[in-house]
Image (cartoon, helix red, strand yellow):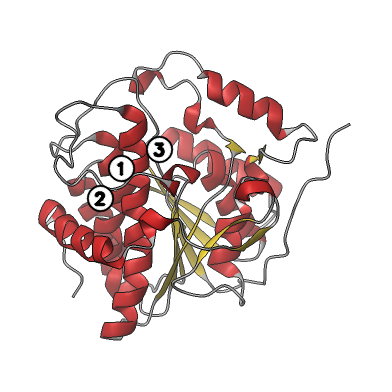
Amino acid sequence: MPRTLVDIDVPRLTGKLALVTGASDGLGLVLAERLAGAGAEVLMPVRNRAKGMTAADRIRASVPGAVVHVREVDLASLASVRRLATELVAEGRPIDILVNNAGVMTPPERRETVDGFELQLATNHLGHFALAGRLLPLLRTARVTTQSSVAARSGGVHWDDPQWERGYDTDKAYASSKIAVSLFGLQLDRLSREHGWGLTSNVAHPGISATNLLASHPELGRESDTRAVRIIRRVATSRLPFGQTAREGALPALYAATSPDAEGGRFYGPKGFQHLAGAPAEQKPYKPIADERAAERLWTLSEQLTGVTFA
């Protein structure tokens, strides 16, 4: 017998502008749909425009009157991030909610971006760092929520070799990239308070969720679903106390981005068994992402690699 699905109420967001990266699939699509359903106007910057248009049509079909806009960005390209940010800043409309959600996970071999960065670090962290930095003029009253992962529970940033040019380990590189973006999300809140930027920033994670992140991605050299995603999909509809659907996995980030009770500088995730499933709640940050000295070091490294500074 299927278990009862978890859900939360979302406050009315009429008049708000939300930007969700990676909104063409998985958790990002759920987040965009839920934000649109609460009345927000949603920007969906995606790498694949055709896939983004299909996702936008799906949202419009499920949410009558939804206002969603597909924009193009490849977070693995600093030039692409710069183009999108330049367009949005020129348009001048403040962004009320920014969800740094897009990501890639465990390609079977090391891949390098056009900028010479390891793919997972570039997409999961550096692209979001650069985007938020360039959008800062539009984020003065925003809530920024960054999507972490249970993979960030252990390990750390690969300081000696950030691009994993030696001894590449795809799983460790993924964990390192999610620790990096989580450190960024929490440090962004500290610096906003220190410098009076006005935004608040928090971090969330989806627990174990059945999304397409581990599915087959021929463009990454993965021709079939991983064993992990097949197991997760089965667990997601079972009565086991761990694993959940993408709709449930999106709830911590949705709560962190919209709830009046969610605060900056906090970490949110499922409150169930081992924080792998269940209703969203605040939890103690994983040790690797609570390290403020590491966050400061990462910020400096990220500025050096991207050429973006937060003025």
Query: In which quadrant is the C terminus drawn?
Result: bottom left
Give whichever of 233, 87 is nearer the camera: 233
* Residue type for callout 3: Arg
Q: What residue lies at 54% left-to-right and 24% top-to-bottom? A: 228
Q: Could you say which is closer to the camera, residue 132 or residue 120?
A: 120
Q: Which mark is residue 126?
A: 2
Q: Comparing marks 3 and 2, which lies closer to the viewer?
A: 2
Q: Mark 2 or mark 3, which is nearer the start of the sequence?
A: 3
Q: Quadrant of the N terminus?
A: top right
Q: Is any part of residue 206 visible from this angle?
A: yes
Q: Is residue 125 left or right of residue 256?
A: left
Q: Is residue 226 above or below residue 94?
A: above
Asked if marks 3 and 2 touch (Cβ < 8 Å), the reply is: no
Q: What's the CA distance linking mark 3 and mark 1?
A: 17 Å
| Quarter of image, res 67 | bottom right
CB contact under 8 Å: marks 3 and 1: no
Disc 2 marks a residue whose amino acid type is Leu
Residue bearing the label numbered 3: 49
Amino acid type at image mark 1:
Thr
* Label 1, label 2: how far apart the Cα atoms are: 6 Å
The front one of 173 and 123 is 173
Left or right of 27, for residue 94: left
Q: Are marks 1 and 2 in contact (CB under 8 Å)?
A: yes
Q: Which residue is mark 1?
A: 123
Which secondary structure lies at badge 2? Answer: helix
Query: Does 308 sit left or right of 257 as displayed?
Result: left
